[in-house]
Image (spheres, rainbow, N blue to C red):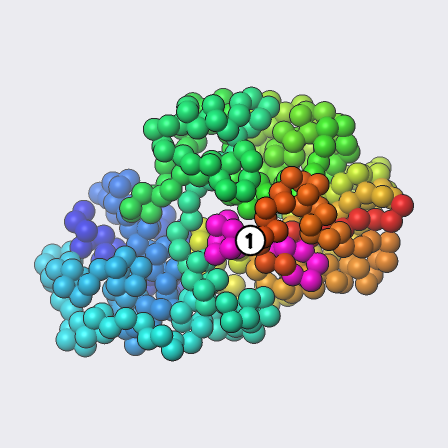
Amino acid sequence: MTPAARLSAAMEILADLDARRRPASEALKDWGLSHRFAGSKDRAAIASLVHDTLRRRAGAAWLMGTDAPRALVLGMLALMRGQDADAIAALCDGSRFAPAPLSDAERERLAQPLPDDAPAAVAGDYPEWLDEALVEAFGDDRAAEMQALATRAPVDIRANTLKTDRTALQDMLAHLAPVETPHAPHGLRILPGPDGRGPALQSEPEFIKGLFEIQDEGSQLAARASAAAPGEQVIDLCAGGGGKTLAMAAMMENRGQIFATDSDKRRLAPIHDRLARAGIRNVQVRTPRGAEDPLADLADSADCVLVDAPCSGTGTWRRNPDAKWRLRPGSLSGRVSEQERVLDRAAALVRPGGRLVYVTCSILPAENDAAIAGLLARDPRFTAVPDTEWLAQAGLGRLADVSRKTGYGLQLTPLRTGTDGFFIAVLSRSA
Ligand SMILES: C[S@@+](CC[C@H](N)C(=O)[O-])C[C@H]1O[C@@H](n2cnc3c(N)ncnc32)[C@H](O)[C@@H]1O
């Protein structure tokens, strides 16, 4: 396909998203199935156009004066890919499969930059209804914070220290030019190519042998915040596919015990293969069965309970820009109730003197500080540990200078820490 034909395809897929209100991944997949002539490079380039457009949807609509799919794609080319009106006009030449030629009005708009006084929701490219929450989170920095969340994310990996170390892994993956992550001690970062595509890491022999996991640096740091140590008893209450379970097992050098569970057994299922590949032997997976509590025997027992809470995922919008426009106030309040339930469940599992580590990949105070404030009010046995204390314990002291301090924890963001948006708070239970 020509670059112009790929643009037309992206416009078609965005129109489908508007009409059917479905996830971008589904629309992209269906488009691929019904256009079998498109090769993998075409499909990747079209997906990148769609995702970049969703990253800059609000800015592109503002620039072009309409949110029609064609305008959004053209606006994105100007705002995100730095193409000038002439370059865009050369693509839109009206030839077979190419978009129709630019109108004079489009040309004029594409030649303008976004005005400096554009509203924060336009400059930062987020849904207007979240403005109040983002003022609370970031104040006057919200446009800059959200602009950083509207960029493409690098791919981070974590060296599995049960099998290798970061330096050796960096040598083995030299063909991908990985660099060290700034904060996580075992992380490497691979920058996306100019088309936004990341490398096919899961086909690397080192991945297949379990020498590394794909994990955002923020997620690696959240696991480190647990300070899980060899010999401890740790519960990963929302283990999902096990990203943080695996990281904590490596920190514990395969000694002690991690109990990993999740309320959704389908999400938990992939953990078994991942544990085997990583050479982990100290994890007991507790799969829920019916209404029975799979952790009923562990009340008041854990040195550490990690709650990697279900959340809005607002901190991952770099990787999943579609989610930014799909989030609704109702789903956010549903998440907040789930967080309350899961925190209460976690509190009942911590031993006297033990710790509860609460993590979200959200930037919204309602899911972060407010969730902690709620637990502290409901359960006076718990207090928030000052960040300087737990960061020192986790060997992450430098993070204090760059992350944003909230009332009870730390907020990591693409702008501040170069990671996805993560919130981390550590609580301790009185003895
Ligand atoms: C952010 S994801 C976990 C990701 C995972 N920890 C990782 O690092 O790959 C949150 C998980 O919480 C689970 N969850 C939701 N409510 C829960 C509850 N009440 N108890 C346990 N798990 C719950 C969801 O099924 C989901 O898998």
The answer to if 64 sits in the magenta stretch is no
The quarter of the image holding the C terminus is top right
Q: Is residue 117 left or right of residue 361?
A: left
- Look at the image and tell me whether residue 70 can be seen: yes
Residue 288 visible in the snapshot: no
Residue at 55% from the left image edge and 66% from the top image edge: 138
For the point 32% across and 72% down, the residue is: 114
Q: Residue furthest right?
A: 431
187 displayed left or right of 297:
left
Instruction: Name the residue nearer the viewer: 216 or 67.
Output: 216
> What residue do we see at 65% from left, 31% from top?
251
Q: Position of residue 376 (x, y in %)?
A: 80, 59
The answer to whether 301 is drawn above or below residue 15 in the figure is above
Residue with the mark numbered 1: 402
Q: Position of residue 266 (x, y in %)?
A: 60, 41
**Residue 271 versus residue 178: which sits nearer the camera?**
178
Q: Which residues are magenta?
A: 406-419
Label 1 crowd (10 A; few <14 / some 14-19 / many >=20)? some
Q: Residue at x 50, y 42 (%)?
A: 182
Which picture quadrant has residue 73? bottom left
Q: Is residue 414 magenta?
A: yes
Looking at the image, is 203 positioned above or below residue 290?
A: above
The kind of residue tagged 1 is Val
Q: Position of residue 39 (x, y in %)?
A: 25, 40
Q: Along the horizontal axis of the image, is 255 left or right of 397?
A: right
Seen in the image, is 263 located left or right of residue 124?
Answer: right
Q: Quadrant of residue 322?
A: bottom left
| Residue 121 locus on image (x, y percent) | 45, 71
Circle 1 sits in a helix, a strand or a loop, which is it?
Answer: helix
